Image: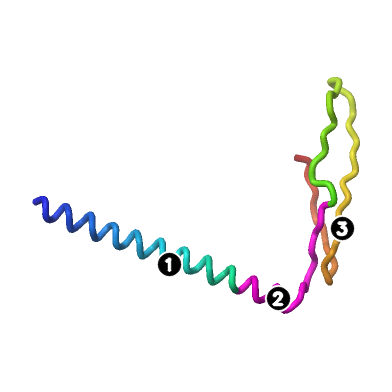
Amino acid sequence: MRQKVFRRSVRFAVWTLAALLMVVGSACMAMAASSSSAQKGNEGPKLVVVESTFNAGKVIEGEDIVHTFILKNKGTKDLIIKDVKPG
């Protein structure tokens, strides 16, 4: 009985390890593909946020806060922003 349980545990560990290796291998291949495409040239839009956070300090309840975030396109293609939502 103990031998069956041990064999099941070993079999489960082997399958788990094989699945983990497949996931890690796929991730490595995806990273290599994106790295090689990036080396070919920076084609496409590239969004750069000059200031990604803003601290308004102490705010009185009901007071309006206005701040402008500057976004730049450092890519070679047009950057199209379709929707913006406040955080």
User: Which quadrant of the structure image shows residue 81?
Assistant: bottom right
Q: Nearer the viewer, residue 51 or 63?
A: 51
84 left or right of 13 in image: right
Single out the mark in the foreground, 1 or 2: 2
Rendered position, 21 above or below 2 = below
Would you name the residue on which mark 3 appears?
Answer: 72
* Left or right, residue 38 beside residue 64: left
Label 3 element class: strand
Badge 3 density bin: few <14, some 14–19, many ≥20, Cα 10 Å: few
Query: Which of pointers 1 and 2 lies earlier in the amino acid sequence?
Result: 1
Mark in the foreground, 3 or 2:
2
Image quadrant where residue 72 sits: bottom right
Which kind of residue does numbered mark 2 sit on? Gln
Q: CA distance from mark 1 to mark 2?
A: 26 Å
Q: Which residue is mark 1?
A: 22
Q: Which residue is mark 2?
A: 39
Q: Earlier in the sequence, mark 3 or mark 1?
A: 1
**Span highlighted in magenta in the image:** 33-49
Residue 66 vertical placement versus 77 (above, below): above
Asked whether 43 falls inside the magenta stretch, the response is yes
Amino acid type, residue under disc 3 in the picture = Lys
